[in-house]
Each structure stands twice: as structure tokens, then as C-alpha cells.
Amino acid sequence: MVISRRVRCGTAALMATTLILAACSTTEDDPVAEPEPEEPQPTQTLREFNTIPVGVPPELFRTEEFAGRGLNLLAGAEGLPYAVALNMAAPQRPSRPVVWVADDGNHWTPIDLTPDSPHSFSGGLVGNNQKSALVGSSFADGTLVSRVWLSDNRRDWVEAELPDEFARTFRVVTGTAAGERILVAGNAVSKDLGVAIIDGDRIEHTLLPQIPDREQRLIVDMAASGDNVVLIAQRGDEGSPGAFVAYTSDDGGITWDGSHPVGDSPNVFVAGVEASGEQFVMTGGVLAPDSDRGFVPAAWTSDDGVSWTPEFVPPPPEDSVFYIAEGVPALLGRPSVRDGHIYAVASNDDSLRAGFYHRVPEGEWFFNGTSELMGFPGAGGVTVGLNPDERLAVLSPFGTGKVVIGVHGRDDAWSERLDLGALEQVGQVEALTSVIDRMFVKTLRVRYDVDGADFSGVPERQLYELFDRGDANFELENIGFDPPEVGNLTNTVVASTDNNELLLLGSRFSTQRNRIEARGWFLPAPGQPWIPVDGFGAVADSQIKGIVQTDSGWYAVGTSTGPEGNDPASATVWRSDNGREWQVDEVLNSGNGSNATAVCQVTDGPVLVAGSVTESDGTAPAVWRLTEETWERATAEILTTGRGELTGCASSDDETILSATSGGRNLILRTTDGIQFEGTFRTEFGSTMREAVRVNGGFAAAGRITNDDASGPVVWLSDHGFRWEPWRVPARTDGIVRFVKPYGDGIVFTMDSELGDPVQIVESLDFSP
């Protein structure tokens, strides 16, 4: 059913859209008990923590300006400059929209639309020779609010006064121009796809055909040719990638039909769509023939948006420095159009260069050469014709905060016009561990060493301890790795003995046995050398994911492929009496494989290992219980009829809480004896709750909330695992809290520094309703 409504605004305004956020009903496949778990009420105002920032090492912050590419590069025309919008941010400041324009494509001038705004913005340009729009969303007062600026000349911009019913309900995702009209599309909290048509002062808002409750969809791109409009989305079951589909309209976006399948999903990836005359051209990639991984550049055309015909996109010449290697994705990015010609940038995760492709109006594709070395792999972007011999390109190495504008010409000539931002690899907190009265923070920064066209990623790990210097002054102090090889362990977990001795377990590659093995190190006291821990080499391909000290000793859990490395990856338990000498206690092989992610002990009860087993029809949650030296799988109905996996395990004096994921949702299971389990909570669709941990007074979990009234990083609190309340944390933009651990009467939590202070302390917690 299609719903249409018209809204009058004083000036041209457009509808913004929000990501899919709505909750859905329980099904028999969900590991959730009846009645349906309580969910947070979106109408309630979220409470916010008072926090204390922790002094952290400088490598966790950017030191130079960030520049991020947004949506389209608009071609120049008579009286119109070339234009592109970038999302730019000074160090530790919110990002802001800056439109860059150049009459000739060579000399660029910035137009800073919100130079003093405290609200972080993300978005980009859409438009044609008649009308241009900058569309996106700002993070303001703990929620995402859509904003739009309009221009007839790309130099003078006026912000549209969007009604709250648009700006706070819908988040702009993409858009297109049809003559003087601007169309904008996005996702609503109800999982509806909405299109707003802006025609002067008139706005028409239309909903696309609805989908079943257990599905989800995300808009990819849209394009218009007169009144014919095509919208590309990715649609599938909750928690799955989904297939690419098309929706079509022949009346300018007022009514819609679809969805129509695009290609042979999951063998298809779509990056964008553009109109060339009366034809639509879609770009992306297809799975390489005779390969189960790795995409190659691809394109499709359609006259109506319903039926799509693959086009031949030639690979680069064999002598090209932009090569396509087996198993390495190479994709065409968003297309741009000028005078019927289509232009696209090819990106390759294994190349420091970007490739350029061009489609002539007759339908033939050509490879035009490459950019210069970008200093970082995966350079992608947008490009458009500057003249018959040259192409203008806006390139950005993936995730680095750097944008380069340049011109590519004959004989692969490349000339840089503008260099913004900086290649900067910022460190992140990789693990947070709280043991007794100590807090440890492990960080990871990947440094890329570039030698000509070759590069290598070098992980740099550091271990810090949190110290209270007094007067609300907290800082991290480097413990150091002596010998340095201690820092080479990957996928590490940290624990401490009753004597405050430190234990670090992880994985490393054994050159002697040519396999990955678990390893460990023991630190008797600060300042002393680390001592190797024995007993982990008996099984292959080992990865440790959890560790706990119980009444009967230490237990570590993870996965391995057995002594010879021939078995499916299976849940594995290691045991130690003192934390120094370890041995394999059990390989919990289910036949098709299994996984152990966490371990804990029920108070006055058994030790539990939480994880999953692989079955013929998917992954099922699993709990193994230690009973008289024997590990047996729990048979509670909630653990044997559902689909998903358990990801965490934490115990208080009264109950044990298990964290789970199923169908894109996060769930909580509860037990008091390790035998009977009940489902107590499920997040709304779009919100995230990571593994719950025990804290003073109850439990806490890191995550993100998103609904009609709020969006952003939160910490979830619950006294007994039934009712969970999301607490807002100080942040500059939308995102997620990554880790939370107990610290005294409060907590320590972490997030990426682009959101705010990466490590913060809450000194006390409030569990009252």
C-alpha cells in the first residue's frame, strides 16, 4: 500500500530519513522467552552520565584535520562550477559540511556552511544543472536531525527550514534531481522507505511498498530521468546482508512499484545508479567467475528500472599497475554523468592507486588508467569528465581522513589540484579489562609502511594501566612489553591473579609448526620481565576469547581445530590451577563445528561456557556446563530451538546473565542454576547491546540506542537482567560505546576518539527506574 501526503513549507524543504530502527515481534526461532521481553520506551528522555575523561596516549587522537568525501561530484556547466561536498573536522571537533567549487576544475574555493556549529554533520551533494542540494544529518542534543541546503548556482546556499515531523523522523540517505525538483530518499523508524519530492515550496512525501516485519532494507542510491525514478535498496532478513533490489516510479516519485531483483545476489554488489538520457546505469561489482570470494568491476543498464542487463566492463590491461587479484575485491564506485557519458572510479583493497572507467553514450566501457600512489590501500572516489582528454577525480584512501582532488589525462598523466586532510592511522582501544581493583587498557594502531607500490600493515599494541592521580585526575600509564614479542599476541585477553599478578593470553603464528597457536605471558610484578606461560600448544588454529578464575581454578575458552588441525573449528576449554601452567581440558566438537566466546561461574553453581554450535540449517546458541569433571551441553528449550549465538557471560550473587545475538538483535538470557534459562530482554531493531558485565549494583553493557527520539552511544544498566535502561554518554556524534568494565562503585567505558574522549569514568551508578 502506498501512502501519499503533501506538506506546505515556507521555503523549499525536504524530507530527511532515519535508519531502520523499529522493533519486531517474537518468532519461534528467537531465543527469547514468552512473554515478549521488555523493551525501552522511545518516548522517555534518556538520562545522561556525568563522566570524567581519562588522560590517554596521543596516538588515540587525530592530530591533523579530517576530510571525508560525501556523495556526488557535480559536473560543471555554463555558469555553474564543479562542486563536491566534504565532511571536514579539526582535531577533536565536530565535522562540518564544506562545499568546494571550481569554475575550471583546477582552482578550488571552500564554502563553509556551518563554520561555528557545535553539531557534527555528515552528508553530501546531489543535483543537476538546474538545482543542487546538500543533504545529510547533524547530531544534536543526543539525536540525529536531518538538514538540507539548496542552491541554484552552487555558491549561495540557503538552509531549508525542515518541519520537525520530517527532520526528526527521517534521515537523509541519498537523493537526485529531476529538472527543478529535488527528490530525497531515506529509511524511517517503522522500516518504511520514504521519498520526498521538493518542487518549489511544495513537498510531497510518499512511502514505498512495505515489507514483512522480520525483514530490513537500506537505501543505496537513486536516479531520475524526467518522471521516471529508480531507487536501489538492499533488502533481506534482519541480521543478513540481503539482496539488491530496485523500486520504480513513472510519475516523478509520487507512486512506487517493486521491489524488483537486481542481478544474482549474493553475487552482486551495487555502489550507485545514474541516469544517462532515458537509460539508467548501475555500477558496482560481481563475484569473479570460478571464485567464491572477490568481486570484479561490473555495470548494468535498464530502460525502466525493472529489468537490468549486464554490460561488459573490461578488466585493466595485464601491464596495468591497477591489477585485479584473485580474492581481492575490485569495485566500481558511484557513477557520475556528463553529456550522456558515465564515469566511475574503481577501487581495489590491494592497490595504492585508483582506476578510472568511462562509458560512452553508445554503451561501451573503457579503462582509462590510474591515479598516482595514494599512500594507502583501497583508494576510491568519484570522477567526471573535464574535457574530452581529461577527467576530474575526488579520491580518498579508505578511512584515513584524507581527500585528494586531481586531474587524470592522456598517457596516464595525473596532476594533483588539492590535498585536504591527512593520512593518519589513529589508535583504538582493543580491549578493556577490570580485575580486582585494577583496570587495564590495551590499544592497537596499525601503521602502514609504504615502499613504492608495495605496502604492509604493522600492528602496534600497547598495554596501559589506569591510575588515579587525585583531584579527579585519571590517566593511563604504559606497562610495556619486555620482551617486545609479548606485544605480538593477537586476540588477547587479560586477567589478574589474587596477588595482582598479570596474565595475558592470545594467539600467534608458530613458524615451527606452521599453524596458529595459543600462547600466554605472566607478569609477576610491575617493572619485571614477562614470563612465558606453558601448555597451549597442543591444539592448532587456537584463539582465546574468554578467561575466568573460579572456585576450582582458571578456565580459558576459545576455538581450535584439534591437535592435528584437521577438525572443524570447535569450542575449546583450557584449564590451570595457578594461571601459569595450562592444559587442554576439552575440545567441545559438535561435528559441524562450534565456538566458545565466554566463560563464567554461577554463584555456588557450575562453570558455564557460552557460545554456539554449527548445524545444517544455521548457528544455534549453546551452553556447556561442567558437571563432575565432565562438560555437558545444556538442553534447555530456549538453547536448542533458537538460532543465533551467545557472546558473553557474567555472574552476580543472585544470577548469571548471558548475552546473545539473533537475527540482528541483541538479547539477554538469565539463569540462577545453570540448568534453566529464560529470555529477559531484546533490543529494538537498530539498537546495539554488547556483552553484559557485572558491576556494582547489577550489570552494564556497552552499545548504541537509536529510535524516534534518540540516537547515539549509550551504556545499558540493569539491576537483575530484566529491565535494561540506556544511559547517554557525552559524545560529539552518533556512534557506539565499545567496551565497559566495573571500576570501584562505577564503570570505565571506551569509544572511538572521533565520538569524544576515548576513555571515560563514571564514579557511581543509579539503577532506580
Image (cartoon, rainbow, N blue to C red):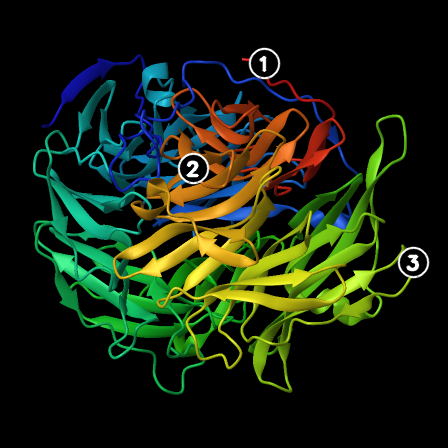
- Image position, residue 641 (x, y; %): 29, 45
Q: Residue at x 26, y 30 (%)?
A: 25
Q: What residue type is labelled 1?
A: Ser
Q: Name the residue under label 2.
A: 676
* Residue 460 in the image: above or below residue 208: below
Q: Name the residue under label 3.
A: 527
Query: Could you tell me which secondary element the residue under label 2 belongs to?
Result: loop
Query: Could you tell me which secondary element the residue under label 3 belongs to?
Result: loop
Which quadrant of the figure has residue 526? bottom right
The one nearer the camera, 755 or 113, is: 755
The disc at residue 752 is none
- Image position, residue 92 (x, y; %): 67, 38
Q: Distance between the residues labelled 2 and 1?
A: 27 Å
Q: Which residue is drawn at 22% across and 55% down?
A: 339
The disc at residue 768 is 1
* Residue 765 in the image: above or below residue 644: above
Q: Distance between the residues labelled 3 and 1?
A: 43 Å
- Image position, residue 728 (x, y; %): 57, 25
Which quadrant of the figure has residue 225? top left
Marks 3, 1: nearer the viewer = 1
Q: Which residue is drawn at 22% across and 32% down?
A: 180
- Image position, residue 713 (x, y; %): 54, 32
Q: Quadrant of the C terminus?
A: top right
